[in-house]
Image (cartoon, rainbow, N blue to C red):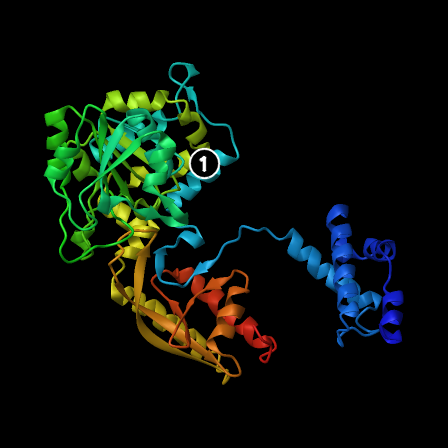
Amino acid sequence: MNPARQALLRKLPGVDHLLNLAAADTAFADIPKTVLTSAVRRVLSRYRNAILADDPAMTDAEIADAALLAEIAQTTRATMALNLTRTINATGVVVHTNLGRSLLAQPAVDHILSIAGRYSNLEYNIAAGKRGSRYSLVEDLICEISGAEAAMVVNNNAAAVLLSLDTIARNREVIVSRGELVEIGGSFRIPDVMAKSGAILKEVGTTNRTHPADYQRAITPETGLLLKVHASNFGMVGFTASVSLADLVALGEKYGLPVMEDLGSGTFVDFSRYGLTKEPTVQESVAAGVDIVTFSGDKLLGGPQAGIIVGTKPIIDKIKQNPLTRALRIDKMTLAGLESTLRLYRDEKTAVAAIPTLRMLTCPMPDIAARAEALKSMIDAMADSRVSAALRDLPSRAGGGALPLLELPSRGVGITISNMNAAMIENRMRRQSPPIIGRIIDDLYLMDMRTVQTDELPEILFAIQTLLKGDQHAQP
């Protein structure tokens, strides 16, 4: 090592010296001692490694007390910041799994806030004055909307499938079409969930074509369940055939076998009435006579993450008694959000207007275009020659493994900034507070207005203004 580098290493102050300086600095007044000490050590380690690597940026000025304290302050701020943070979804993907999936309706948010900070009747029957069941808080509502005899809720749909299979078909054969052995997000596969439940998978048909006779030939004394899985996260076209739920129910009745349907992204709304792709509704499945239906409480339903199980009372009662139920149960905040969301479905018009997922999916193009034009006008009004905005037509998607073939026409705002390419803009916008998550199409950074809320437009404008104040030549 050259003598200049050795001199710099010797000049690096010790941990105690920097802690004493920080103790006298009001910028660190609210920082816990453990966080501050860790930040000091991390900063000194970074600087020491940079000097040893012969980084030319390491000079006497860089290792001065003031420079080190500034770096320590930045490190402590990053450490103290919440990891789970709000974002602005400008991707156009409505149910964006990576960005928290469905937004809750305001009544659900309000109810969660009222329950979270106070005691509640989570498992207390107020009328009887004794212990109650948390499932009863939403069961009647679910049955009212779906038409089912009974219902219960667990923490997600994968859990609902696992619990149902474990209860109904442990150590028994479950017959399912080969074309319905789907893989959902996070590499969770129906065969894997089935194996974990103790059920024995029995595939029938081919990838693209399955007929009622395929099920019928596969039924043996070891058969415990006929299963239909809705392919909500992919589409198959061309030379295809599948067994209808009605045919499967008829087959189950003939052989005395229960029938279960995993709807995945379940919905209470017939989207075809709004010009969108037809999705089977929970009500239709229940009316077809299926014994058990499982579906998500978030995604297309627009509530909190949950797995909902509806069906015949004898089977639901057995599921409730399964020891796994306790491991998979939902908490009071989820129940509060779900109950408030379900109440909105008593009137479909109210639900579509109040539940953000439904509102964004069915949003008329003129409304989206108006938001795009409003944001472009706000950017233009900045009168900054470094930035320009342009309107672009682009497709949005439902997301969350729902309506996979549907492209929703939308309009976005693309921005260009001098001395910055699209990747740099995307990186800088993602690092704003709140982070703005857009997308790049044809080397243009775009923000899709289908998933941007009107009250978020000023925040996007502020983010662009903040970005322009930074170093335009810095690399992402």
Name the residue: 25% across, 32% down: 174
**Quarter holding residue 394:** bottom left
Q: Quadrant of the C terminus?
A: bottom right
Q: Is residue 335 above or below residue 184?
A: above
Q: Is residue 299 left or right of residue 62?
A: left
Judging depth in this view, the residue of 233 and 379 nearest the camera is 233
Judging depth in this view, the residue of 220 and 403 nearest the camera is 220
Name the residue: 41% across, 48% down: 186
* Residue 138 visible in the shown view: no
Residue 335 x/y as whole percent: 40, 34
Q: Is residue 12 left or right of residue 474?
A: right
Residue 44 x/y as whole percent: 79, 60
Q: Which residue is mark 1?
A: 333
**Residue with the most extreme bottom position:** 385
Residue 398 x/y as whole percent: 30, 56
Judging depth in this view, the residue of 302 and 115 nearest the camera is 302
Q: Is residue 270 left or right of residue 56?
A: left
Judging depth in this view, the residue of 452 and 158 nearest the camera is 158
Q: Is residue 301 above or below residue 20?
A: above
**Quarter holding residue 287:** top left
Residue 210 x/y as whole percent: 15, 44
* Residue 19 visible in the shown view: yes
Look at label 1 and name its amino acid.
Met
Q: Quadrant of the N terminus?
A: bottom right
